[in-house]
Image (cartoon, rainbow, N blue to C red):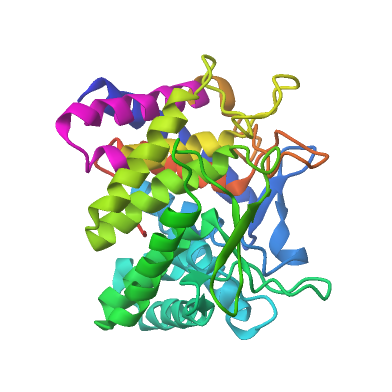
Amino acid sequence: MTDNQTFATATLSKITTKMAAVIKRNRNIIPYTTNVDHHYINVYKNDPFWWTNGFWGGIMWELFHLTGDTVYRDEALEVENKLDNNLMSAEHLDHDNGFKWSLTAVAHYQDDKSEAAHNRALLAANNMAGRFNLSGNYFRAWNDEDGRNRANLAIIDCLMNLPLLYWASDTEKDPRFAKMAYAHALTTQKKMIRPDGSVKHIAVFDPQSGDYLHSQGGQGYEHGSSWTRGQAWGIYGFTLSYEHTNDASFLATAKRIANYFIANIPDSNHIPIDFRQPTEPHLEDASATAIAASGLIELSQHVEEADQQIYLNAAVRLLRTLTSEGVDWNNQHDAFITSCSAEYHEDHHEYPIIYADYFYIEALMKLTDKSFKPW
């Protein structure tokens, strides 16, 4: 084995050892973060529609593919069943259908061609397709809030939800879904990626004419800054759109964003919430580290040989630092990655968030022969 494979295999072994204890404490829940005792909080109990509710199911499928232990498959199916009420509430349906159902129903369908899973994923894809703005060629991000119409907003995160639509087209032999996904990726490429490779979080359109109006600040430091999780979504999302469309411009865009990201990695390898945030206090978002690492590995598989090691080495550098300095290996604690931040301007920073663990495990699996890919 190569050094990278040896490192990833050893780390995944530690993960499966800890998860054997974690799963015994956490049956029939959907977590987002942990409490002061480092145990998962069941977010599903208070918010069954929360956008991250597919990631626990995704982790369960990862662990099933790693270990073959059906306890993880059973828990993944439990999550999928719990998400059914998301398909029945128009008020709570949103552009994050991919995060919810690619990691659950699509992963399930890949496993055993379940008709129920196929039905759920296709319903989710059809619902997401209904959010497509024909004038502007973009997917509406959020629903209305507090009487405010938000039909004019698209966000960088949506790139990661497009594979649900590519899957629907492939499965149904129906090009409609893929054409909408492709159009949204082109709009994102043209309107949300700056020449230096930094990305905008939120784009504002005229929903009637489809004209792009301006960008606005989101979860980063300020308008015009460089939110690192958005950068990571861009690397990974454009790489996935390249895989599904073979449009070389998407690969070039993924490389441009990746080059910017790599150039801004601090010497410590601890990724800040925003590359343009003030030096002090240093606020970290390790979820951006994990997402970027997985995206960079994915990107390395499609570039010319001269560039492969650039992206792969950067990913492994981030993963090694996370593993040695950013993971809680205590089997009595539930989460792995500890220093995530949802956004810069919130009261609470550097705590576990479920999607960081998903992408961390996914990235390590890509370095071995255990790769699991629902995208």
The percent position of residue 206, horizontal first and vertical second, equals 61, 72
Q: Is residue 151 left or right of residue 159?
A: right
Residue beneath the point at 41% across and 22% down: 317
Image coords of residue 166 (percent x, y): 33, 69
- Which residue range is magenta in the image? 298-322
Q: Is residue 8 visible?
A: yes
- Nearest to the observer: residue 65 or residue 205: 205
Check the image and report above or below for 52 versus 365: below
Closest to the observer, 125 or 155: 155
Q: Is residue 78 depicted above or below 373 in this figure?
A: below
Image coordinates of residue 354 in percent, x first then y, are 60, 48
Verify whether residue 310 appears in magenta: yes
Viewport quadrant of the C terminus? bottom left
Occupied quadrant, residue 70:
bottom left
Tell me what residue is drawn at x 68 percent, y 48 percent: 217
In the image, residue 312 lies in the stretch drawn in magenta: yes
Is residue 277 shown left or right of residue 156? right
From what the image shows, is residue 34 above or below residue 242? Answer: above
Q: Quadrant of residue 54?
A: bottom right
- For the stretch drawn in magenta, the main secondary structure is helix
In the image shown, does 256 or 353 lie closer to the viewer? 256
The N terminus - image quarter = top left
Q: How many marks?
A: 0
Whether residue 108 is visible, yes or no, is: no
Q: Position of residue 230 (x, y in %)?
A: 54, 45
Q: Residue furthest left?
A: 305
**Position of 159 compared to 29: left or right?**
left
